[in-house]
Amino acid sequence: MSFIESEERRALRAAVAELGAKYGPSYYVAKAKAGEKTDELWNEAAALGYLGVNVPEEYGGGGGGIGDLAAVCEELAAAGCPLLLMVVSPAICATIIARSGTEGQKKHWLPRFADGSVKMAFAITEPDAGSNAHCITTQARRDGDGWVLSGQKTFISGVDEADAVLFVSRTEDQKGNLRPSLFIVPTDAPGFTWTPIEMEIVSPEKQFICHLDEVRLPYEALVGEEDGGLLQLFAGLNPERIMATAMGAGIGRLALDKAVSYARERQVFKVPIGAHQGLAHPLAAAKVELELARLMGQKAAWLYDSGDDMGAGEAANMAKYAAAEAAVHCVDQAIQTHGGNGLTTEYGVGMLAGVVRLMRIAPVSREMILNFVAQHSLGLPKSY
Amino acid sequence: MNIVVCVKQVPDTESPRKLKSDDNTLDRAAADGVINELDEYAIEEALLLKEAHGGEVTVLTMGPDKATDSIRKALAMGADKAVHLVDDALAGSDALGTSYAIQQVLGRTGFDLVILGAESTDARTGMLAAMLAERLGVPQLSLANKVEIDGSSITVQRITDYGYDKVEASLPAVVSVVEKINEPRYPSFKGIMAAKKKPVEKLGVADAGIDADKVGLAGAATEVVDFADAPPREKGQIVTDEGDGGAKIAEFLASKKFV
């Protein structure tokens, strides 16, 4: 193995960084504040194949791996344009359909993930089933040759701009530990409604509560096995964590870049403030954390792309934990470095605080990752 | 149509650029190398012409080993193949030597059209296209912001201080382009993946039939005898609006030939 990314991966990063620089933080923030979407960037990145790098070639995608998609996500985030729906649509949904879908589903959806012309949201969290997915109550009932779906989901990203949502549910006679059944629900399906959740985060992508009231679906809405194993779900959740790592690393880089250029220029007491160890050391420490998180993210992607789902699970969880911590520390120290300017709108640092703080909670909380590591990596007894 | 694009790798304009104190040449190792900005427009124009008229686009780069990154990017954008002229004997060549070396390589590749950026961001002499056309004995169409090809004739719009000229010539020809000509594309993911499989021919001075005495620092007809850091930026002019602010700004811009 090598710790140096391939020539193609580096070229991809450079190309995406250049595209990201054309838009930049000002574009992203303006869109978020105007209540608009980043459609121009999404469409341009999609046309260049950047959003479908991980879709198999036979369905029009780039034929690359989650490592390539994560590189795209990280570079856009580092350019000030974190695209949250990349984590959901091409990473989770396209992966699940590519791995568990029928040939018909693949032919229908994958080419549109490949060219970015479709967005699919992903709905797992429920008001009473947050970190504990086994409490999921969204229920699918067989009805003739189709299904009827009812239930409620919360904190679902991007439903308003999605063409469909992939719902994690259980069939009516399935009790106890979750054996998930996954359904694709078009956003225009009768009985499917959603309401936005007001958030204290600067982001063009919004969060929603989804209501499914007797939503009638054709048989082909089911992806993979009915009452399938958790593995078909985890097929999509490892990429989610790898992408969350990439996004955290990208935002961390952005914050650190801003802090470093400010610390080089800003002079107080006749020297640049970056010469003072009180500011230099915390920035250096944040850099160390950031690089370690990136490295673990690359390991997770490498394991996942080489087919080791179990190995990838541990690495992806650890990477996601480390990236969220690193991003929080990078942004916090960037704010501190900027002094009062750190919380102004103009310098664009303070507004990163909400989103990196969220990364400690979603898509999987810091505490649940530590539970996982304590139990699976260390062999400690289960606490819940 | 056989289109050759001359692509130069230059130090990233975002990073500080330095000359070496021992021989007064550019320190190419000190900064990241990127494709000279105007050359990206030249690549784009070559690709557009190929898409419209068919043919093949060859990237021609003279530069050290690390210029490979720039060649790969040009190939990822869509060029078909590349020739990389790389030899320590070429280091320090001036425009005269460079034009001679490129002429020799063009003698091997052949060409219907050679496209270059109008100048490089490092040396900024803006002379290469003219010297190359002279050496090759073909027409030069400079500072183009529009290129049209019809059979064996080529027409360009050429930017001038007062508007533009329309210039026509017959192929083969040399064209230099300015940034108004197009919007260079980003390499697509498929382009990036395909670039690695595209042929890159590496040539040394001897392979290309170049007389080593006519190139490099020793063969240069010009010499940088001294250099100094650019003076710090002067304070800008502040226009106070007393009802005539607009007119004053227009006057200032006109004095600098911006309008």
Image (spheres, grey):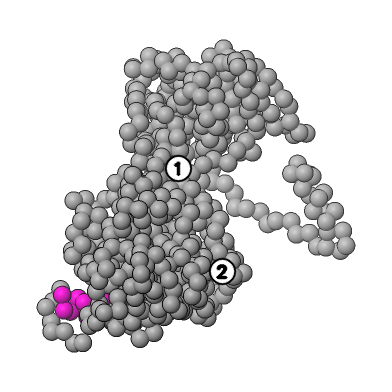
Residue A344 visible in the shown view: yes
Q: Nearer the viewer, residue A177 or A227?
A: A227
Q: Residue at x 36, y 47 (%)?
A: A59
Determine whether B167 is above or below B10 in the image.
above
Determine whether A183 is above or below B163 in the image.
below
Residue indicated by mark 2: A32
Circle 2: residue type? Ala
Looking at the rendering, in which quadrant would you find the C terminus of chain A?
bottom left
Q: Nearer the viewer, residue A1 or B34?
A: A1
Q: Position of residue B246 (x, y in %)?
A: 83, 56
Chain letter belonging to callout 2: A
Please give the range of residues in magenta: A366-376
Callout 1 and callout 2 share a chain: no
Does A369 appear in magenta? Answer: yes
Residue A199 visible in the shown view: no
User: Mark 2 packing: few (<14 Cα in 10 Å), some, or many (20+)?
Assistant: some
Label of residue B149 in the image: none
Q: Based on the displayed image, in which of its 4 quarters is residue B168 positioned? A: top right
Circle 1: residue type? Pro
Q: Nearer the viewer, residue A129 or A199?
A: A129
Label of residue B187 in the image: 1
Chain letter belonging to callout 1: B
Q: Position of residue A111 (x, y in %)?
A: 41, 50
Q: Based on the displayed image, in which of its 4 quarters is residue B62 positioned? A: top left
Determine whether B93 is above or below A379 in the image.
above
Q: Position of residue A84 (x, y in %)?
A: 44, 66
